[in-house]
Amino acid sequence: MSIMTEFKEFAMKGSVVDLAVGVIIGGALGKIVASFVGDVLMPPIGMLLGGVDFKSLAITLKAAEGKTAAVMLNYGNFIQAVVDFTIVAFVIFMAIRAMNSMKRKEEAAPAPAPTTQEVLLTEIRDALRAK
């Protein structure tokens, strides 16, 4: 089998295609959530905290000298990343929780009644055990 044929079989497997779709949708969802957090959620939180913009929070470790840029510890970016992650994780948790609840409803459907052949085989099994 040639490498191209083997690669084509690998790439066309359902799990690989599903993974690719998941990565693409995840990237798009990440952009949406980042915009929600940065543009909608964080401004009111910053306003409640006295006009603080988390991304601007930093500690200057070494001041700028001439052409050398200042050395900064940008802990505000870290806080922003933690908030983004928490919101993304919560959204994903809620989506998976909703999907799992739908699966449970499907699984809760009553099992079909046993066929007459199954009933007869069960009776024969029980009779054999009784002996």
Image (cartoon, grey):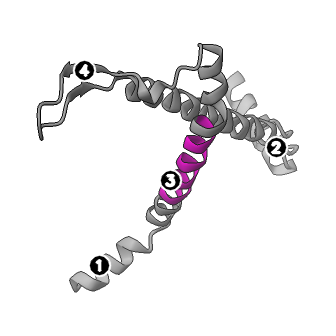
Q: Residue at x 44, y 74 (%)?
A: 12
Real-space Cα distance between discs 2 and 4?
Answer: 83 Å
Q: Which residue is mark 1?
A: 6
Residue 52, relative to residue 43: is it above or below? above
Q: Nearer the viewer, mark 4 or mark 1?
A: 4
**Which label number is shown at residue 27?**
3
Of label 2 and label 1, which has the lower sequence position? 1
Q: Is residue 22 positioned above or below 108 on the image?
A: below
Range of magenta residues: 22-37
Q: Amino acid at mark 4?
A: Thr
Mark 2 → mark 1, Cα distance in angstroms: 50 Å
Residue 23 among those drawn in magenta = yes
Give residue 95's quadrant in the image. top right
| Label 4 CA crowd tier, 10 Å (few <14, some 14–19, many 20+) | few
Report, in whole angstroms, how far the alpha carbon at label 4 lies from the one at label 3: 33 Å
Question: Was residue 50 drawn as part of the magenta stretch in this picture?
Answer: no
Circle nearer the N terminus (3, 2):
3
Which quarter of the image is occupied by the N terminus?
bottom left
Viewer-side residue, 56 vs 86: 56
Q: Quadrant of residue 39?
A: top right
Left or right of 40? Residue 122 is right
Q: Nearer the viewer, residue 75 or 113?
A: 75
Q: Amino acid at mark 2?
A: Leu
Q: Amino acid at mark 1?
A: Glu
Residue on which disc 4 sits: 60
**Upstream in sequence: badge 4 or badge 3:** 3
Marks 2 and 4: CB-CB under 8 Å?
no
Q: Position of residue 3 (x, y in %)?
A: 22, 81
From this view, report whether residue 69 is shown above or below residue 50.
below
**Mark 2 lies on residue:** 120
